[in-house]
Image: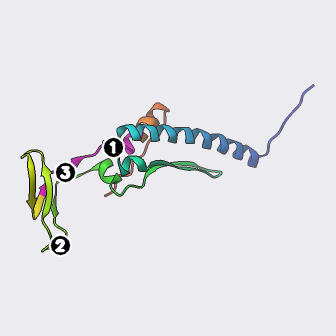
Amino acid sequence: MTIRIKINRTNATWIAARYAASWIDERCKEIERHSRNMVRVRSGRTLGSINRGGVTATSRRVRGVVRSDSPIALIEDRGTPRHWIRRKRPNGPPLTFYWPKVGHWVQFNRVDHPGTAGSWFLTGAMVTVAKQHGMEAKVNTFR
């Protein structure tokens, strides 16, 4: 005796997409964990803003999102080149900050900032998890 079970193409696609969505969600959880461990500042807005944005599935693609809504997330992730920091208004108060190198508070009208190296806390986590699971990671580099 033989029993045959058939599934139509629409249902097969839906089942595959559902499985893929679950798998992608697990990878997004891993990326979120890695990102939280890689961010340099262990408290504050950037660390608190790392979250999964959900998984969307269509018949052709399943996409998961891990993001940071912090306004400085891109700066923390990619770093900054050398740049000038100026006071907000031409006749406004000077820039005031504690400078550990000289050991006291200083004031300047402008500062030649040496830039910062990026921690790659989001993109680095994505690449790490992708390699662990045999996936290819594509990182958009924009500024």
Q: Is residue 67 visible?
A: yes
Kindly give the residue lying farthest to the bottom in the view shown: 91
Task: Report which quarter residue 3 is drawn in.
Answer: top right
State the CA–CA distance, disc 1 to disc 3.
15 Å
The magenta span reads 112-125
- Residue that carries the numbered disc 2 in the rendered image: 89
Crowdedness of circle 3 by 10 Å Cα count: few (<14), some, many (20+)?
A: few
Kindly give the residue lying farthest to the right in the view shown: 1
Q: Nearer the N terminus, badge 1 or badge 3?
A: 3
The nearer-to-camera label among 2 and 3 is 2
Q: Note whether 54 is above or below 42 in the view shown.
A: below
- Residue that carries the numbered disc 1 in the rendered image: 120
State how the image is colored: rainbow
Q: Are marks 2 and 3 in contact (CB under 8 Å)?
A: no
Task: Report which quarter residue 37 is drawn in.
Answer: top left
Numbered disc 1: secondary structure: loop
Q: Position of residue 40 (x, y in %)?
A: 30, 42
State how many labels appear.
Answer: 3
Which numbered dot is residue 115? 3
The residue depicted at 17 percent of the width and 73 percent of the height is 89
Q: Amino acid at mark 1?
A: Trp
Q: Nearer the N terminus, badge 2 or badge 3?
A: 2
Q: Position of residue 31 (x, y in %)?
A: 46, 40
Q: Note whether 3 is above or below 126 in the view shown.
A: above
Residue 121 is one of the magenta-drawn residues: yes
